Image (cartoon, grey):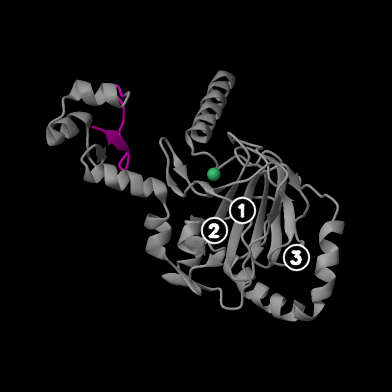
């Protein structure tokens, strides 16, 4: 019995590690440290003190968003809320009408949102020099700040009153702490190359209910302005457009280079259906004759 338990632990550990390493650059990283990093607050308090008269407006907006998100988790970098929210509605409209927007960093885009060679890239990479100021895009509250997150390195997540969240990764320094209220344009940290990064840049994500959307859908990086007054996230967008893996598999399936296992399928059935030799299917997908195929599994053809 003891031995079985031991084997199970090994298997689960292996499976977990595999799932982690198989994931993209920084989409579902392990939260390596639950402890929030609390640096000096001096830098932001001077900027905040002048804006106390707007506080009631902000807190009202914040309450609406809080309801939508359900909670304000300062220990998890990802908060996927779209499934819960879309149980009762098909879309959510984010309005920027009252918002001031500031580009986090002015620089060239090194890498766009989308599928990269081997994995999805859920952010927009903006070129910078180590030590450059990184600014918060909209008014908001720091939800998460951590110096050591797998992939992301030093990272800050800010929840905005408009309903979005923004993520700032690979920083070399963090100046803010969870629950700090910030005005758009406040310097929140310094750029760097921490985490999985090949050189100094800002990995910037815009998220809506936990879904990383393409920031270029709303931001005009050349002019440093917003492209639109509103952003509508539909359930379909959340599940398909902004689900890069779904998109990739869908296009592969369309090109007939991938087969999605259906209920009742066996390897030999699939070989017959697709006309692809059984031995080739097994080799290509590293399968044994006895492997049980679960519906939904993707096979390379
Ligand atoms: Zn990136």
Q: Give left or right: position of 272 versus 151.
A: left
Res 32 quadrant in image: top right
Packing grade of label 1 (10 A; few <14, some 14-19, many >=20) is many
Q: Quadrant of the N terminus?
A: top right
Q: Is mark 1 in CB contact (under 8 Å) with mark 2?
A: yes
Residue 139, relative to residue 167: is it above or below? below
Dominant SS type (magenta): loop
Q: Is mark 3 in CB contact (under 8 Å) with mark 1?
A: no
Residue under circle 3? Answer: 181
Which mark is drawn over residue 167?
Answer: 1
- Marked residue nearer the N-terminal end (1 or 2): 1
Considering the numbered disc 2 on the image, is that residue within a helix, a strand or a loop? strand
Which residues fall within the magenta stretch?
Answer: 287-301
The residue drawn where x is 54% and y is 58% is 207
The answer to which of 112 and 149 lies nearer the viewer is 112
The answer to which of 223 and 238 lies nearer the viewer is 223
Q: Ligand 1 within 8 A of label 3's CB?
A: no
**Picture quarter with ligand 1:** top right
Q: Is residue 38 shown in magenta? A: no
Considering the numbered disc 1 on the image, is that residue within a helix, a strand or a loop? strand
The residue drawn where x is 83% and y is 74% is 50
Give the distance between the C-alpha atoms of the residues marked 1 and 2, in whole angstroms. 8 Å
Residue under circle 2? Answer: 207
Give the distance between the C-alpha atoms of the residues marked 3 and 1, in whole angstroms. 15 Å
Considering the numbered disc 3 on the image, is that residue within a helix, a strand or a loop? strand
x and y, in percent, of residue 30 in the image: 61, 39
The residue drawn where x is 76% and y is 77% is 55
x and y, in percent, of residue 44 in the image: 81, 61
Packing grade of label 2 (10 A; few <14, some 14-19, many >=20) is many
Q: Is mark 3 in CB contact (under 8 Å) with mark 2?
A: no
């Amino acid at each position: 019995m003891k031995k079985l338990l031991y084997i199970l632990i090994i298997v689960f550990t292996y499976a977990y590690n595999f799932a982690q390493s198989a994931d993209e650059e920084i989409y579902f990283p392990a939260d390596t440290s639950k402890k929030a990093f609390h640096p000096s607050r001096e830098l932001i308090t001077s900027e905040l003190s002048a804006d106390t008269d707007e506080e009631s407006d902000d807190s009202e907006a914040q309450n609406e968003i809080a309801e939508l998100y359900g909670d304000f988790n300062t220990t998890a970098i990802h908060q996927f809320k779209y499934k819960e929210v879309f149980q009762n509605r098909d879309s959510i409209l984010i309005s920027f009408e009252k918002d001031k927007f500031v580009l986090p960093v002015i620089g060239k885009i090194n890498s766009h949102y989308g599928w990269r060679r081997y994995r999805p890239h859920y952010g927009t990479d903006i070129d910078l020099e180590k030590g450059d100021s990184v600014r918060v895009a909209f008014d908001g509250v720091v939800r998460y700040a951590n110096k050591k997150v797998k992939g992301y390195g030093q990272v800050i997540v800010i929840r905005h009153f408009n309903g979005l969240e923004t993520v700032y990764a690979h920083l070399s320094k963090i100046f803010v702490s969870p629950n700090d209220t910030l005005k758009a344009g406040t310097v929140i940290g310094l750029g760097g190359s921490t985490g999985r990064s090949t050189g100094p840049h800002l990995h910037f994500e815009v998220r809506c209910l936990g879904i990383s959307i393409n920031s270029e859908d709303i931001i005009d990086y050349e002019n440093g302005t917003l492209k639109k007054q509103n952003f509508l996230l539909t359930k379909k967008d959340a599940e398909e457009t902004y689900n890069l893996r779904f998109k990739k598999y869908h296009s592969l399936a369309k090109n007939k280079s991938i087969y999605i296992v259906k209920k009742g399928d066996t390897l030999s059935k699939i070989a017959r259906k697709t006309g692809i030799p059984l031995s080739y299917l097994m080799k290509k997908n590293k399968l044994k004759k006895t492997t049980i195929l679960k519906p939904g599994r993707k096979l390379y053809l």
